[in-house]
Each structure stands twice: as C-alpha cells, then as structure tokens.
Amino acid sequence: MNRIEQVRSLISELEPDMEKFYEKGNKAAGTRARKTLQEIKKVAQEIRLEIQDWKNSGKVDEV
C-alpha cells in the first residue's frame, strides 16, 4: 500500500466515528476517532521524514 492510499484509508476509517461522536454524542466513537487520529499523526510524521530524506539525498530531482 502506498502512502497516499494509507492516508486515504485512515481518513475513511475516521469519518464514521467523527460523525457518531459529533452528531450523536457517542463517547466510544470519540475514543476510536482519537486512536485513528493518532495513527494519522504517526503516518504523517513518517511521510515527513521520508520526504526530508528524499530531498536531502537528491532523489527528488530523479522523479
């Protein structure tokens, strides 16, 4: 799974729980949403580091 698909998957996983929490007040959905948001944060940091490594190694010019 490439990084774009990974982020899309996490966001689509997040949406139903966000709706349940904000529209219905479901506390368990809020917990699940926070867990998914933490995973998104982790993946985003990994992507940031990959981009920085590519930039510093000169691989960006090859793409």
Image (cartoon, grey):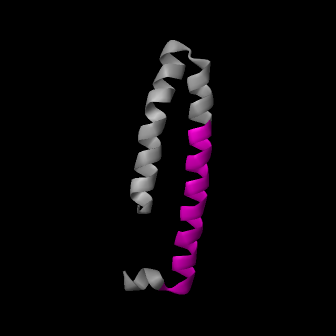
Percent across and percent down for residue 7 are 45, 51
**Residue at x-position 49% and y-position 21%:** 20
In the image, residue 43 sits, relative to residue 33, either above or below, namely: below
In the image, residue 3 sits, relative to residue 38, either above or below, namely: below
Percent across and percent down for residue 33 are 56, 33
Q: Would residue 12 appear left or right of 27 to someone viewing this image?
A: left
Q: Nearer the viewer, residue 34 or 61?
A: 34
SS assignment for the magenta stretch, majority: helix
Which span of residues is magenta-colored? 35-58
**Residue at x-position 59% and y-position 47%:** 39
Percent across and percent down for residue 9 are 42, 47
In the image, residue 38 sits, relative to residue 60, either above or below, namely: above
Percent across and percent down for residue 63 are 36, 80
**Residue at x-position 50% and y-position 28%:** 17
Q: Nearer the viewer, residue 5 or 50?
A: 5
In the image, residue 5 sits, relative to residue 54, either above or below, namely: above
Q: Is residue 52 magenta?
A: yes
Q: Is residue 7 magenta?
A: no
